[in-house]
């Protein structure tokens, strides 16, 4: 009997199913539209180059509103819910990983990790919280007639500075992913080399 055509090779292990990969891609696309449209609204040179400010504002507003949709849709997947549970659970090995990261100790033996390392867990928690804050402050800025001026002013201040912070953090996230082709392969195809998994995520039992 022939093996299934879509089965991973013997030297590879399954890291992500279809639903987690779809959620990641859809969220990344919406976040990209948000960041690029925000840059076109706030950077004068880009605003002049792109023009059509009303269209850019509409893209920014609706892509921001849609940001939670992929995650909410992904909750229908058992695999995605399992990954969320792992991301939301910190253990003693995660504290060890963070201490090693602060010391810039890059030895795999000093950075124990399950399916997700502590850095990925911290990033996921931070970006989720930041997205909710951006959504809330954006709604306050959008529906100006529903809130007093001091609320809108405060919301604008938080929204603008948090947007800049998100841009910096996203650049770091993309840079780290670019430096690890195997991690990108895992998100792109769903499988990674077993040797990489055993070295970078020794506590993970796929």
Image: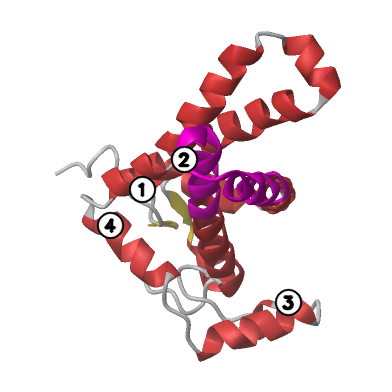
Q: Residue at x 49, y 68 (%)?
A: 116
Secondary structure beneath dot 1 equals: helix
Q: Are marks 3 and 1 in contact (CB under 8 Å)?
A: no
Which of discs 4 and 2 lies nearer the camera? The answer is: 2
Whole-angstrom CA distance, mark 3 to mark 4, is 29 Å
User: Which residue matches tag 1?
Assistant: 71
Whole-angstrom CA distance, mark 1 to mark 2, is 8 Å
| Residue density around tag 4, few if under 14, some if 14–19, many if 20 or more, within 10 Å | some
Q: First in sequence, mark 3 or 1: give its number.
A: 1
Q: Are marks 1 and 2 in contact (CB under 8 Å)?
A: yes
| Residue density around tag 1, few if under 14, some if 14–19, many if 20 or more, within 10 Å | many
User: Which residue matches tag 3?
Assistant: 101
Let me know if residue 1 appears in the view: yes
Instruction: Report the front residue among 98 and 50.
Output: 50
Secondary structure beneath dot 2 equals: helix
Residue 146 magenta = yes
Tell me the chief SS of the magenta region: helix
Q: First in sequence, mark 4 or 2: give its number.
A: 2
User: Which residue matches tag 4?
Assistant: 79
């Amino acid at each position: 009997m022939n093996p299934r055509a879509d089965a991973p090779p013997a030297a590879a292990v399954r890291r992500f199913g279809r639903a987690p990969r779809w959620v990641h891609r859809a969220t990344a696309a919406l976040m990209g539209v948000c960041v690029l449209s925000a840059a076109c609204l706030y950077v004068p040179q880009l605003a002049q180059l792109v023009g059509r400010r009303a269209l850019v504002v509409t893209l920014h507003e609706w892509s921001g509103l849609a940001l939670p949709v992929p995650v909410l849709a992904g909750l229908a997947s058992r695999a995605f819910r399992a990954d969320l549970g792992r991301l939301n659970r910190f253990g003693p090995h995660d504290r060890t990983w963070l201490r090693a990261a602060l010391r810039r100790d890059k030895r795999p033996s000093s950075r124990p990790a399950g399916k997700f390392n502590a850095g990925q867990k911290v990033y996921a928690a931070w970006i989720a919280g930041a997205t909710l804050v951006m959504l809330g402050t954006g709604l306050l800025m959008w529906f100006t007639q529903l809130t007093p001026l001091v609320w809108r002013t405060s919301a604008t201040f938080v929204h603008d500075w948090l947007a800049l912070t998100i841009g910096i953090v996203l650049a770091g996230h993309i840079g780290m992913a670019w430096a690890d082709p195997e991690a990108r392969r895992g998100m792109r195809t769903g499988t990674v080399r077993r040797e990489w998994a055993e070295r970078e995520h020794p506590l993970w039992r796929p």
